Image (cartoon, grey):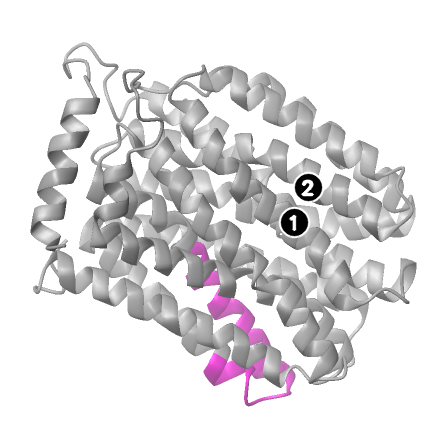
Amino acid sequence: MDMHQSSVDLTSEAKSEISPLPEAVLPPTDTATAWLVVLASFLNLMLSIGVTTTYGVFLQYYKLEEFPDASTSFLSWIGTLQTASMCFFGIGAGVLCEHIDTRLLSLCGALISGLALIIASFCNSPWKLLLTQGLMFGAGGSLLYITGLTLPPQWFTKYRALATGIAIAGSGIGGLWLSFATRAMMTSIGRQWGLRITGLIIIGICGPTSWLMRMRFRAVRNERVIELAFLRDCRFALLFFAALFGACGFYIPFYFMPSYSAIVLGKSNSWGTSISSIMNGTSIFGRVAMGLVGDRVGSLNTLCTMTLLSCLGILVLWLPFTSVGPFVAAAVIFGLCSGGIVSLIPVVTANIFGVKRLPSTIGLLMLAYTFGDLISSPPAGAILDKYGHGTSFTSLIIYNGVFLALSTICDILLRIILSRKLWEK
């Protein structure tokens, strides 16, 4: 189908399905109320995605301390199921956001994900952790994730990328302090109480702040739960595959760099925790800074640049070297650039397809994240066991870099389709 015709069809169908209120009736954008939504979204993402990015610390502990006889691939499935189920249930969560009060959805997400970790604290086998710390947490986290990801762009026009970047920086800040807190709790009071305390924190923080998670407007309840016109638009297809390949490459460094530091570089477990914190720390800066840059030079232009640099960090710095300096540099560059990627995807989606049905549009993209996550870390763990014999990470790093390269290609093609003037915003 011709791209231009597809875009026209999408626009006309979207207008026919949505009856937006006049702009004068809607709450104004870029206000103090809008920034309160950003604050609540920040906390939601801090305690949903932030928890998943610390699974590398759990993986290292499970493999080296609690379940040494379990395969790396199976243990990786716990963290993978966290993010995969979060993304899969995010498809439905995006639809629910357009039909149910998002404040109620956020509250339910806090209760389910918090209880999941508390129940996981009583589990003593990998398969039970798979169902609780993995599947159940992901189901509850999807409600926190989707509301936190899709509400900030609705409340801003001038500072949309910056506000979204600040909200999504919460996941990086969560990963930063939770990495140290998780390691400290497992060392001092044990894994079980560490999970219980984390679950109580989620309920205690995200529960009350759910009252702030209000949508600016809603789509009219119509026959189409999901706008199928997106599926006929080649722009959405490119964005979908960019997200899929990007998801494939995103979690591998977070999961395996801590283990790499111990196995290849001979560092301590606490040093591996520091690497997770370095990536999360630079990711925080990347999410905010790239949001600011995106508002000035264009979110898609910034997204293309960040995806390319993350690919180069993996293939140019991590792959050929086995020394501390290049490894730390690769972790810093990947953390910085991956943070920018995470914060810019919803902004690019809103800029191309509009914000009125952004929750369900992001929900469709969650399908890409689901598949991407499923074919990232577990196969990477299997590659490490089979071809690297648990000690050589070369094949795993190449596997990681190829996905990031494919994501870069899709982003660049999308940029060319939208405008041949490559630096047009």
SS state under label 2: helix
Residue at image position (36%, 60%) is 242
Q: Nearer the viewer, residue 186 or 127?
A: 127
Tags 1 and 2 in contact by the CB under 8 Å rule?
yes
Q: Nearer the viewer, residue 394 or 44?
A: 394
Query: Image quadrant of residue 352?
Result: top left
Dot 1, crowdedness within 10 Å: few (<14), some or many (≥20)?
many
Residue 24 in picture, x, y percent from top left: 14, 12
Numbered mark located on residue 81 in the image: 1
Horizontal side of residue 17 vs 184, given as left or right: left
Query: Image quadrant of residue 251?
Result: bottom right
Dot 2, crowdedness within 10 Å: few (<14), some or many (≥20)?
many
| Mark 1 and mark 2: Cα distance apart in space | 6 Å
SS state under label 1: helix
Residue 174 lies within the magenta run: no
Horizontal side of residue 147 vs 253, given as left or right: left
For badge 1, the amino acid type reads Leu
For badge 2, the amino acid type reads Leu
Residue 326, placed above or below residue 96: below
Q: Which residue is mark 2?
A: 135
Residue 174 visible in the picture: no
Residue 70, placed above or below residue 397: above
Q: Nearer the viewer, residue 284 or 27?
A: 27
Horizontal side of residue 390 vs 237, given as left or right: right
Residue 144 in picture, x, y percent from top left: 54, 31
Name of the residue lying farthest toward the top: 25
Residue segment shown in magenta: 315-339
Q: Nearer the viewer, residue 177 or 315?
A: 315
Residue 208 in picture, x, y percent from top left: 60, 17
Residue at image position (63%, 58%) is 277
Residue at image position (25%, 56%) is 300
